Amino acid sequence: MLSVENISYKIGRFELKNISFTVDKGDYFVILGLSGVGKSLLLENLAGLLKPDSGKIFLRGKDISKEKIQDLNISIVYQDAVLFPHKSVYENIAYPLKSRGINNVKELVMKYAAQTGIADKLDRMPETLSGGEIQRTAFARSLASGSDIFLLDEPLSSLDSKSAFELRTLLRKLNREGITIIHVTHSYEEAISLASKIGIMENGKLVHVDLPQEIFKHPKSDFIAHFIGVKNFLKGELKSIPNNDLKEFNVNELSIFTLTDIDDGEAFLMISPDEISISNKTQETSSRNHFKGRITDIAPARIGVDITVNIGLDVIAVISASSLVELDLKIGKEVWINFKASSCKIYK
Amino acid sequence: MISGIKNITPLHLVFTFLGGVLLLFIVAPVAGMYFNTTAAGLTETINDEAVRNSVWLSIWTSMAATVIFSLLAIPLAYILARKNFPLKNLVNGIIDIPIIIPHSAAGIAVLGMVTRDSFLGKAADLVGLKFVGNPAGIIVAMAFVSIPFLINAARDGFASVPERYEKIALTMGASPVRVFFTISLPLAWRSILSGLILMWGRGMSEFGAVIIVAYNPQTAPVLIFERFTSYGLKYSVPAAVVFVTVCLALFIIFRMVRKKKDA
């Protein structure tokens, strides 16, 4: 649907360099990167608001570098400065419809407002809305502009966690309904929760594009590993246990206990390496998860030492150098790893 | 946070005193003028057709100058706020020239431009328009000295509108013209309105440039000056009081309307 070929764009000392990727219809592509790596600049190039110095962008098979912005049918939603402040929710949603000379404005505004859950606030001015309501209105307005591709620039960053959760649900729904989404963020939680494909941006370059589980499993650079800060990232199936507040997360042959209120079904599990302890014998503790495995790697980390233990799959624990000596850990040695059900973070 | 009256320090007292002296400096001469005017003198002046005509001439020519030249000033202000181009600083400097040059010199400059021997004067002559000694000349002179106030206010107004609103509107199928009239202009309107009021007020009170381009028909400032030089202070004060009252009344009305709109 959208194909970006080697685009470069220079502004001052900063440069987007040779960026290429493709996004298929129905994709949810999340571009992950720290602030200032050029994510917003890339989006503005895609939206036609900035013209790349070199390279090409094809939308629906057509080179759009010469097209007028208003003919592109790409919608952009920013983190802030989102709604026109002098227009009500209704007028904001109606704006693209009126711009395109569409007749049944009222009917369509109602339809899109209902789709994004803002239909009861049509008379309100933006300054009286919450952050979540502002973004819902912005999404309704993007739908009204007839776009089937949304460019989202950190749309959830200024929201509280409850609103962000609700908006993520809405974005997934819109995506299922056929909207292709390119979403830039610095939050890996957003990326995990939403993306069907993730791109990592670093210093104006898109350094890695892959499926979420691959990105987190096999970071292709120190930057990614450091930036993501995620080492134990698993894709599996979440299942309730009758008469128990714990749930089972099944991956390969393993069953991991988790404490979560996320619904059953396909999910991602993350365990921070510093939440995992290593022992030479099985222990009786409050930790619900104990697995026997063999050490496959020992590597110095930024702080402490990373111990990779294969328990059917590789799990990384970080321990202090003194623990390494005291427990006499070596590659090939059989050990136990232990972690609490509550230290397993589940994402859908 | 604005601190309350409890937190006043000696420094605040000194500043308040200095500020009070300044306010008195503005208010006292104007108030003195009112105290030195008798009701009889004021009635006589109001009934004087020449005074009434001059006040009306000042009002409508300054409004005309503001409206006509705003059509040129607002687009320029938008370009200055949104675009970077070579010699932009020079353009910004040029805009402020009318503020810094003596207004009599401004009048001479304008007169040179609109006199019958000039290109503009000749062209206007062809369509039967005269500048010198004519309201058209007054309008040009008023516009010349007051236009920087509008351009500067409008430029600041447009600059304070986040460009993202315009970009979003463009991606929604709005043409650049529609974006300007539905997004940029309404959002910058408060500053533009301030600029329009300032320009209009400045134009209406202009004396130096106007008297050189058009001694007649007489605007109110020229009439006040003429009464002063011909008959002295006593006879010029009632005319000044009438004009100042009209200016203040209009100024207060505009500010109230603006405030109401903002609320």
Image (cartoon, helix red, strand yellow):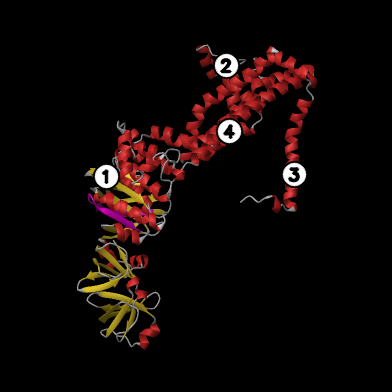
Q: Are marks 4 and 3 on the same chain?
A: yes
Q: Which residue is mark 3?
A: B18
Q: Which residue is mark 4?
A: B149
Looking at the picture, does residue B97 appear above or below residue A294? above
Where A263 falls versus B217 (above or below)? below
**Residue bounds of the magenta highlight:** A15-32
Judge whether A321 appears above or below A267 on screen.
below
**Label whose residue precedes the other's in the sequence (4 or 3):** 3
Is residue B112 among what the camera can see? no
Chain letter behind tag 4: B
In the picture as drawn, the residue positioned furthest to the left comes out as A253
Check the residue under mark 3 and report the chain it is in.
Answer: B
CA–CA distance between discs 3 and 2? Answer: 52 Å
Say if mark 1 contacts mark 2, CB within 8 Å. Answer: no
Residue A163 shown left or right of residue A65 in the figure = right
Query: Residue drawn at (72%, 23%), measured in percent from left and top?
Result: B241
Instruction: Residue A148: give its label.
Output: 1
**Alpha carbon distance from label 1 to label 4:** 46 Å
Left or right: residue A41 versus residue A335 is right
